[in-house]
């Protein structure tokens, strides 16, 4: 690997960040799901690069798993949700898109500032990229807070998960396989449950917009 | 899908365009039959665009007008203004029987006359409506491709 | 900087003139290539790639019309549009990192030369005193007001890495440090720059270059009054701007192949590399256009805001990781 | 220095003559004397900038108790030069402009006083002297705004706003300087500077904040700008030009003098605050300029924009100098000063041009103008040149300033602390965005105002203004070109001033030669060569086109899609031109849009009349100033309840107060 290791790692992690920002940027839910899928692929690439650099077979398996679950299975399920609910093809943000983007850039600056100390502890090609993981988590949370559609909420949750995964890859350099496996299955379960829920709620009520669901309480 | 380009039609003697022709389409009183055929002349099957022809938005950008319909009273003024807005050298293409000779609307109420009464016609495309292929052929005779 | 001093003046002038010639010819050809690609994707044969050049040749032989209310601005604007673009092309690092006046080829200079062209055209659009001219000017300036800052900031992200805002030096620096090309900064800046370039060149989904409907036009509406050689100059200016922006994207991010020593063979290689890179970008953009619908005018700022924020993020990541 | 004293004396004489002579003679004589004074002031400032040693005058005769101290150093000289440049043009302009209210005795007496105070503020070297001239400046300019109050109610309103804010600002400055004086052992600047190092931190920061409040308000920085968009448009044109070109600059001068010079640089957060104010001002001003449809109002908002950029430069320079990056600090400071000088030239020219339009067409509402380019060729040409300068077309003065500023911010990035880094970053963003917005605003100003068809009877009957007004506008266009083509001519001088202002002690200027080749950083811009290239390209294109074109030109009616008539009302107006951007920034501008549709009585599907109104109010004014004013009103109403005119009641208040005091003391 040698010289190519750091640039390729940079590129993959950068792609994770770009995809995170683009999910806030696009309104088309299908495009957002595509971005999520690309982010999954980029995340898998990060794991793969780390695995080949550290000659860690476990990590390589994890990378393959991440690729399969986050790159294909989960986005595929989400696409089915979107297809099942054609009324919600566009996100309905609570905060408008340019403002969200400005906020996201502030979050990214914040994550770089807070992780400066972490990087200082063990400066390496991998730990330098930790802020990207933190930023992805923050952007995911932001999406959870400000997007109305159930699908966008799931995407937000998955962004948070991807961010956490990226940080763990970069910092611990070798999560026990079983932990990652458990986490991945967990997420998969959540997505399946949510998918079922969304479809059923829509069948029953005719909308999947969360603000409108709140009126059910009354 | 696209029709093969037939033999190159005889080039018009009016002007030499060397493979480039922009037309401004003016509907002076058409039944919109010609419009449908013009649209399909530029569609995938006849693809007049491959011979260098194009419809444009402004007569300033155009080499001529593509006129459809009989000249109705309300459109006579706009037609003259459009002709005045063309940079020389320019051509007038009459598309369809109405534009060429008045067609079935010739003596109807509200008609000022045929296109030929207003301005000398350079190219005539007969037919009611004309076949897309003959529209394309007329374009080719002007572009020379 | 040292290498710049060693390139003889003749080489640099020749390189600049060659750049201008290449982009002035290639710009229209790229337009032709893009519409050919789109036509093929839509199942048509499409006009030949050289069609834009044929159109220009024909326009030169036509009459010039000048509407009654226009002032000197209308007459001068086409010349200004093309001249500013040509100077920007001449000084930018397109086929060599040592063009004439390369020391002045600062990002701000190039961006503001392009802005000057936009301003001239927008004023010309207002000059005839028609409804559509004003509409086009207003829209194009609105888009430009958001796109040009994003363009500036995106390139500044690169200059943060290179510690200079001089374009030839940025390109030379990228050649010397290939690792720069893969940094997150570059990735963000590239995405931002592509969004901006599409807006600046009036392509889908921002503006539809093939539209005949005045109400949906942006660039086209401004130039409705131009005819003959004036129209040729404006059209050539737009094509050259497209060429310049594509070439800048190509060279700032993928500089390989550009001539860096003062050899004339390097220039020839540079031309070949540039043509190849630009054609690739053009085909890519055209393919994307086929699959994209034009967005509503009032959604355009949202797209550009995205580009702007990505550019700012590129600077931020560049600052904290250097 | 002695030349400057001569200039001040000439101004004083001009003021006297303006007050004493009969109508036609007083305008001519006071204008000529002010012109002479400007020349003297310019000469003295040039000699100070070229390195004649710093001279000082002290006189006890002029100001009782404290005496008057004046020192002409390079920093002050830059601002004297700015005033001299604008004042010279304005005095020539006056010869052609003056009729009606401005020809009045009070106006021709006050204008020289205003110029005098503007020349004296930058050389004042003691607290008393500074405050004296500062107040003189405030008073004379306030009265000059009020000159046309009989004709326009807006002028009265503007005077009130300006008077209130400028007095509050002056109070704040006085308090701040008093804090320094108390701790500094004297009221002369020299002693304050000498004792500044020993000052307690809190005192220094308090003093700077108070002073900043006052000076930033004078500089028109958001949110203390509320007076500026009211006063600049309503003032007579020569006064607007002086206020926008020169008076606003004194605000920047004050910040530099106190923060950079007297307090020796201070702490980081001061400068971060200055830069933050600058960023907000730049964006706010640029945005409002795009939404404004009043020609002078647009120029006023654009003043807020440019001064915002200058403050970004000043703040960044201060922050860089505090963090020890002297080279970058000097570069940024020079950029800010260059931008300020360029601003005085182009904004002065724009205001004078706008005044000429107002004179010729009888209105400055862009929605009623149009078609002036063919009716007023000279004025339009000069206005166009100034427009291109502010849009920052390369090889013109505005571009030189912005390019240097960008270089300063960019080269400041290396090895600084996080707050500085964020300041610089946001500065770059503000510079970029304001550049784009300025282009929109000024394409609107020139394109709608001067091109197309006339939108009103006034505009269609406009005739060219007197030669003197054209000459004055042209005079201010000279530096627009000169500082663009050869900015290096004054960069060494500005380097000196920057060193002086921030105590940088750099040995060589930031750039050498007439072009801008940076001496310490990798970066260069040679405007002469670029201009030559542009000229060559233009010539080549022209030759090729005329050789290739085979047919002539023909004048025809504008293409209106074949419509019967192409009326001026079909054109885009200033409001419609800015509307798309207004939509984009609807959260910031918050326009009031009213659409009133009157339907036909027979059917609601047919409309009889449509009334559309789109007003953009200053959001800061609406959300900050209005509530405060309303609060004061309520307080005033409450207090009025206590007063019924009864003398007994007033005496009773006094008595009760006396009793309360006694009880408290006991």
Image: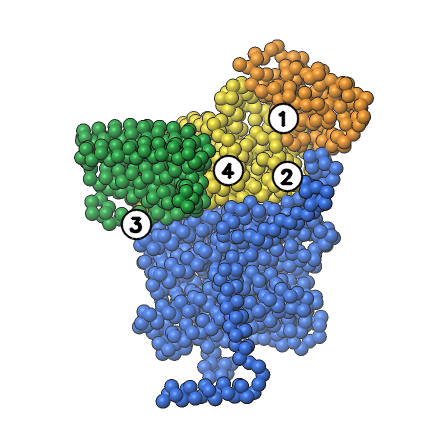
Where does the image place residue D453, in percent across and percent down from the top left? 69, 46
Q: Is residue D543 left or right of residue C26?
A: right
Return the residue at label 2: C132
Q: Please tell me which residue is depicted at 65% across the width and 67% down the height of the picture.
A: D148
Mark 3 vs mark 4: give the one in front. Answer: 3
Q: Chain of mark 2?
A: C
Taking the spot 42% from the left edge, 64% from the top edge, the residue there is D256
Q: Which residue is mark 4?
A: C200
**Classed neighbour count for the residue bearing mark 3: other residues with Cα under 10 Å, few (<14), some (14–19), many (≥20):** few
Label 1 – label 2 distance at C-alpha: 18 Å
Residue D544 quadrant: top right
Q: Chain of mark 1?
A: B
Q: Which residue is mark 1?
A: B55
SS type, badge 3? helix
Which chain did the renderer colour blue?
A: D
Q: Which residue is mark 3?
A: A113
* Distance from the alpha carbon under mark 3 to that under mark 4: 34 Å
Percent from the top left, x then y, of residue A204? 42, 34
Q: Nearer the viewer, mark 1 or mark 4?
A: 1
Viewer-side residue, C99 vs A148: A148
Q: CA distance from mark 1 to mark 3?
A: 57 Å
**Dot 2: what SS?**
helix
């Amino acid at each position: 690997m040698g010289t190519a290791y750091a640039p390729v790692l940079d590129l993959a992690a950068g792609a994770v960040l770009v995809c995170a920002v683009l999910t806030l940027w696009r309104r088309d839910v299908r495009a957002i799901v595509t971005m999520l899928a690309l982010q999954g692929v980029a995340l898998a690439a990060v794991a793969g690069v780390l695995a080949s650099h550290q000659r860690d077979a476990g990590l390589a398996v994890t990378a393959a798993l991440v690729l399969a679950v986050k790159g294909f299975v989960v986005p595929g399920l989400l696409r089915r949700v979107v297809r099942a609910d054609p009324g919600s093809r566009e996100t309905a943000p609570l905060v408008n898109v340019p403002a969200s983007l400005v906020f996201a850039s502030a979050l990214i600056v914040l994550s770089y500032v807070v992780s400066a100390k972490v990087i200082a502890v063990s400066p390496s090609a991998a730990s330098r990229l930790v802020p990207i993981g933190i930023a992805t988590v923050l952007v995911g949370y932001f999406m959870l807070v400000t997007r109305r559609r159930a699908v966008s909420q799931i995407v937000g949750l998955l962004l948070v998960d991807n961010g956490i995964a990226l940080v763990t890859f970069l910092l611990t350099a070798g999560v026990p396989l079983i932990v990652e496996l458990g986490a991945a299955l967990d997420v998969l379960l959540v997505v399946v449950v949510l998918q079922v829920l969304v479809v059923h709620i829509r069948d029953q009520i005719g909308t999947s917009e969360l603000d409108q669901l709140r009126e059910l309480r009354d | 899908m696209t029709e093969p380009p037939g033999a190159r039609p005889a080039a018009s003697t009016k002007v030499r365009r060397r493979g480039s022709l922009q037309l401004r389409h003016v509907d002076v009183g058409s039944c919109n039959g010609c419009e449908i055929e013009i649209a399909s002349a530029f569609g995938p099957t006849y693809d007049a665009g491959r011979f260098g022809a194009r419809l444009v938005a402004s007569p300033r950008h155009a080499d001529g007008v593509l006129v459809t319909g009989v000249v109705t009273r309300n459109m006579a003024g706009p037609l003259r203004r459009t002709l005045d807005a063309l940079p020389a050298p320019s051509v007038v293409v009459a598309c369809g029987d109405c534009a060429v000779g008045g067609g079935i609307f010739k003596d109807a109420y509200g008609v000022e006359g045929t296109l030929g009464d207003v301005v000398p016609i350079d190219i005539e495309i007969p037919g009611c409506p004309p076949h897309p292929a003959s529209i394309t052929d007329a374009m080719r005779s002007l572009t020379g491709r | 900087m040292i290498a710049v001093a060693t390139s003889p003046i003749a080489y640099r002038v020749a390189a600049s003139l060659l750049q201008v010639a290449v982009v002035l010819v290639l710009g229209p050809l790229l337009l032709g290539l893009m519409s050919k690609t789109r036509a093929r994707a839509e199942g048509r044969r499409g006009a030949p790639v050289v069609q834009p050049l044929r159109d220009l040749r024909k326009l030169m032989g036509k009459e010039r019309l000048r509407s009654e209310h226009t002032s000197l601005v209308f007459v001068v604007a086409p010349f200004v549009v093309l001249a500013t673009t040509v100077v920007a092309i001449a000084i930018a690092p397109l086929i060599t990192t040592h063009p004439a006046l390369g020391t002045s080829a600062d990002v701000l200079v190039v961006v503001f030369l392009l802005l000057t062209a936009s301003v001239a055209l927008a004023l010309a659009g207002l000059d005839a005193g028609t409804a559509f001219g004003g509409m086009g000017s207003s829209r194009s300036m609105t888009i430009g007001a958001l796109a040009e800052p994003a363009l500036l900031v995106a390139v500044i992200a690169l200059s943060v890495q290179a510690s200079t805002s001089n374009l030839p030096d940025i390109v030379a620096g990228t050649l010397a440090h290939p690792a720069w090309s893969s940094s997150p900064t570059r990735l963000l800046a590239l995405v931002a720059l592509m969004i901006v370039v599409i807006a600046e060149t009036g392509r889908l989904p921002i503006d539809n270059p093939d539209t005949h409907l005045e109400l949906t036009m942006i660039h086209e509406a401004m130039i409705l009054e131009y005819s003959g050689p004036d129209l040729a100059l404006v059209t050539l200016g737009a094509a050259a701007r497209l060429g310049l922006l594509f070439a800048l994207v190509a060279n700032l991010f993928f500089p390989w192949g550009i001539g860096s020593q003062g050899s004339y063979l390097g220039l020839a290689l540079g031309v070949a590399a540039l043509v190849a890179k630009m054609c690739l970008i053009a085909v890519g953009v055209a393919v994307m256009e086929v699959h994209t619908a034009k967005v509503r005018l009032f959604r355009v700022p949202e797209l550009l805001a995205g580009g702007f924020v990505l550019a700012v993020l590129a600077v931020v990541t560049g600052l904290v990781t250097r | 220095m002695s030349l400057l004293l001569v200039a001040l004396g000439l101004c004083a004489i001009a003021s006297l003559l303006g007050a004493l002579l009969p109508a036609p003679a007083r305008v001519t004589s006071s204008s000529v004397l002010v012109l002479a004074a400007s020349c003297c002031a310019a000469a003295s400032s040039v000699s100070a900038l070229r390195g004649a040693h710093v001279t000082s005058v002290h006189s006890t005769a002029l100001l009782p108790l404290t005496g008057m101290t004046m020192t002409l150093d390079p920093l002050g000289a830059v601002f004297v030069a700015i005033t001299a440049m604008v004042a010279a043009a304005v005095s020539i302009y006056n010869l052609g402009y003056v009729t009606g209210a401005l020809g009045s005795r009070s106006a021709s007496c006050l204008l020289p006083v205003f110029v005098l105070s503007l020349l004296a503020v930058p050389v004042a070297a003691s607290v008393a002297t500074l405050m004296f001239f500062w107040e003189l400046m405030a008073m004379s300019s306030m009265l000059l705004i009020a000159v046309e109050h009989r004709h326009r109610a807006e002028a009265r309103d503007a005077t009130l706003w300006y008077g209130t804010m400028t007095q509050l600002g002056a109070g704040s400055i006085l308090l701040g300087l008093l804090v320094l004086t108390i701790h500094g052992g004297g009221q002369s600047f020299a002693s304050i500077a000498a004792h500044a190092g020993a000052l307690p931190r809190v005192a220094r920061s308090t003093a700077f904040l108070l002073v900043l409040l006052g000076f930033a308000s004078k500089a028109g920085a958001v949110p203390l700008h509320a007076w500026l968009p009211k006063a600049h448009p309503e003032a007579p044109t020569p006064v607007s030009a002086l206020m926008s070109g020169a008076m606003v600059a004194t605000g920047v001068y004050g910040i530099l003098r106190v923060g950079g010079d007297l307090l020796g640089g201070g702490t980081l957060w001061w400068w971060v605050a200055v830069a933050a104010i600058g960023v907000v001002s730049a964006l706010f001003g640029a945005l409002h300029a795009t939404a404004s449809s009043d020609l002078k109002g647009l120029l006023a908002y654009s003043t807020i924009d440019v001064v915002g950029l200058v403050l970004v430069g000043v703040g960044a320079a201060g922050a860089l100098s505090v963090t020890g990056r002297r080279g970058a600090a000097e570069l940024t400071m020079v950029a800010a000063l260059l931008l300020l000088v360029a601003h005085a030239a182009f904004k002065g020219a724009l205001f004078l041009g706008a005044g000429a339009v107002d004179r010729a067409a009888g209105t400055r509402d862009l929605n009623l103008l149009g078609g002036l380019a063919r009716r007023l060729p000279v004025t339009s040409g000069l206005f166009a040149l100034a427009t291109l300068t502010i849009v920052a077309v390369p090889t013109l003065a505005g571009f030189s300033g912005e390019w240097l500023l960008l270089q300063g911010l960019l080269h400041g990035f290396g090895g600084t602390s996080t707050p500085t880094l964020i300041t610089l970053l946001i500065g770059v963003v503000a510079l970029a965005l304001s550049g784009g917005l300025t282009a929109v605003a000024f394409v609107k100003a020139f394109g709608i105002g001067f091109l197309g068809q006339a939108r009103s009877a006034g505009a269609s009957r406009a005739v060219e203004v007197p030669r003197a007004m054209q000459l004055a506008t042209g005079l201010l266009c000279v530096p627009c070109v000169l500082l663009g083509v050869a900015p290096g001519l004054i960069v060494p001088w500005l380097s000196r001033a920057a060193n002086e202002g921030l105590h940088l002690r750099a040995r060589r200027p930031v750039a050498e030669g007439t072009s801008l080749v940076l001496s310490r950083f990798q970066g260069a811009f040679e405007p002469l060569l670029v201009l030559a290239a542009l000229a060559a390209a233009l010539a080549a294109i022209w030759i090729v086109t005329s050789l290739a074109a085979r047919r002539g030109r023909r004048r025809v009616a504008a293409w209106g899609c074949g419509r019967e008539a192409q009326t001026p009302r079909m054109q885009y107006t200033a409001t419609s031109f800015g509307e798309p951007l207004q939509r984009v920034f609807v959260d910031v501008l918050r326009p009031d849009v009213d659409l009133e549709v009157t339907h036909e009585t027979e059917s609601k599907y047919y409309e009889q009349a449509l009334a559309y109104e789109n007003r953009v109010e200053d959001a800061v004014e609406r959300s900050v100033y209005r509530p405060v004013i309303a609060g004061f009103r309520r307080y005033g109403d409450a207090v009025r309840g206590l007063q019924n005119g009864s003398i007994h009641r007033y005496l009773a208040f006094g008595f009760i107060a006396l009793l309360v005091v006694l009880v408290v003391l006991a």
